[in-house]
Image: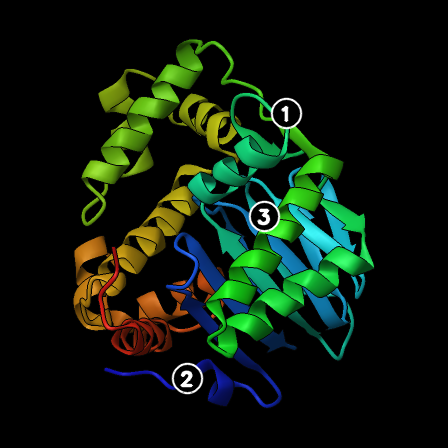
Amino acid sequence: MEEKDAATDRKGEWARHWPYPGVPGLDLLRARYVRHSFTRHTHEGFVLGAVRQGVEDVAMPDGTIRARPGTVVMINPEVPHSAKAGVPEGWAYSTLYPSTGLITAIAEETTTLRGTPGFAETIVEDPDTARLVHEVHRAAEQGNALAADSVLRIAVARLLRRHGRSLPPRAPRDSGARTAELARQLLEERMARPPSLEELARELGTSPFALLRAFKAAYGLPPHTWLTDARVRRARHLLDAGTSPADAAVAVGFSDQPHLNRHFSRIVGVPPGAYRRERARTYKTAGGGPS
C-alpha cells in the first residue's frame, strides 16, 4: 500500500525530508504544518530549526518553548520533545539534522569544547543565524554543495561558540538505571514481538511500576513510547536501504503499513513512502547509494 505525499494529505500543508549527499551526515526538513503535530520522540543526532512564518510550540523536558521567526531551536541528541502549531495558521520552517559526528568535527576545528559537544540552550533569538539555516536549505535545493557546506559550518560554529557546552558524562549507573538499560536491550532485541510490561518486569526481577519509573528516568519516555520511537528509527534505516514501507512495517513490529504510516508521519514529519522516494531520488541523482 502506498500513501499519498504529505503535501496532498492536508490542505495547506507540505513537507520535504531528504538527505543531502553534498554534506555527509546532514538531513534536511522544510515544511509548512497547520494541523500536523509531532508526538514525543528523540533523534540520534542534533536538531537545528528556524521558523519562517507562524509559531511552533516545542514541548521539551523542562517546558514548552515558542519558536518564532528570528529564533533558532537547538536540540541535543536523544532529548525527548514534541511539537505542534502555536497559532491557528500553523508554522513554516527549515530544519537541519546534522549527525553527532558532523557537529563534533566542527566543534573540534572551531571551539575549545572538550568531550561531547552540545548546546546549553534550546532556543535563542538570533535572526542572522536563523537566516543561515534557511540559506543552507536554499543552497542544497539548488545543488550548490560548496555553499551548503560552507554556510552550514559557519552557522554551526557560530552557535557552538555562543551557546555550546560539553555535554555531561553519563551519571554513575544505579540499579534502576541498569534495569532500564537491560529493558531497552530486550525491547530492541524483540522489537517485532515485544513482551508486556509485566512480562518484562518479571524477567528483570522488578515490578511494573518500578520499571516504569526507572525507564522514564533513564530515557525520558515510558517503555511503550520509547519502543514506537525505536521502531520508527529502525524503519528509517530500512527505508534508507531500499526496503518497501510494507516490508519495513512488518520488520519492526507494526501490525500493518497504516500503523507505520501514522507513527512515522508523527515522528519524522512525512509519510514513509514520501521519505523513501526522496532518498531514492536523491541517491539516483548523486550517482550512488546511502553510506
Distance, label 1 to label 2, CA atoms, is 44 Å
For marks 2 and 3, the one nearer the N-term is 2
Drawn side of residue 252 relative to residue 264, left or right? left
* Residue matched to label 3: 81
In this view, the residue in front, 82 or 159, is 159
Res. 100 mark: none
Which residue is label 2 attached to? 5
Question: Which comes sooner in the sequence, label 3 or label 1?
Answer: 3
User: Residue 243: x percent and y percent?
Assistant: 18, 67
Q: Amino acid at mark 1?
A: Thr
Q: Residue at x 64, y 58 (%)?
A: 49
Q: Secondary structure at mark 2?
A: loop
Instruction: Report the amino acid beneath label 3.
Output: His
Say which quadrant the N terminus sits in. Answer: bottom left
Q: Position of residue 66 (x, y in %)?
A: 78, 56
Q: In the image, is 146 to the left or to the right of 260?
A: right
